[in-house]
Image (tube, rainbow, N blue to C red):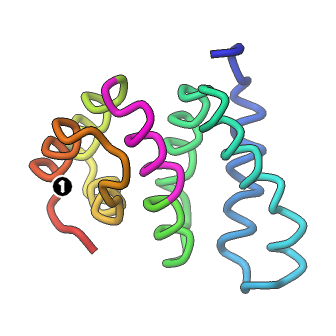
Amino acid sequence: MAGAISDKRIDAVATAWLAAWNAEPGSDVMERNQWANHQISNWTWEDEHEALWKFILSVYGRDLSNRAIGELAAGPLENLLSRFGVDYIVRVELLARRDPRFNFILGGVWQHNTDTDIWNRILKIRNKSW
């Protein structure tokens, strides 16, 4: 991991990401905020997984369109679990047990490249897949 990402930066990325995914597809708002998707991708592939986790925590409880919920599940959360699941599965399990909203979002995660042991733990904790 390269270095700590500030909470202010994570909040800025979360705000822009939400603006993009809550906007109409192809709109100016979506286009202007695509930089946030690139930042999240960089965090994923540059092993900035703690920033990715903090981003997920910052976003999931906010006002999300159905499209944004799907993108969060199939994008950042799925990527976190497939690349760094062993480091985050306990946190994911704890949050999914105590927060029905997070558990619902976890239902949109697919196995992708997630380790089988981690995936089985996800299947046990989430209430429903979609």
- Tell me which corner region of the image, top left, top right, bottom left or bottom right, holds residue 31: bottom right
For residue 31, above or below residue 104 = below
Task: Verify whether residue 4 appears in magenta.
Answer: no
Predominant secondary structure, magenta span: helix
Task: Verify whether residue 82 appears in magenta.
Answer: yes
- Tell me which corner region of the image, top left, top right, bottom left or bottom right, holds residue 28: bottom right
Q: Magenta segment range?
A: 75-86
Point 17% across, 67% down: residue: 128
**Residue type, label 1:** Arg
Give the class, few, some or many, for how many residues have Cα within 10 Å of label 1's Cα (few <14, many ≥20). many
Please give the residue where the numbered disc 1 appears in the rendered image. 126
Side of 50 where 73 appears, left or right: left
Side of 117 where 16 appears, left or right: right
Point 71% across, 23% down: residue: 5
For residue 57, above or below residue 24 = above
Point 83% across, 54% down: residue: 35
Quadrant of the frame with the N terminus: top right
- Tell me which corner region of the image, top left, top right, bottom left or bottom right, holds residue 52: top right
For residue 85, above or below residue 125 = above
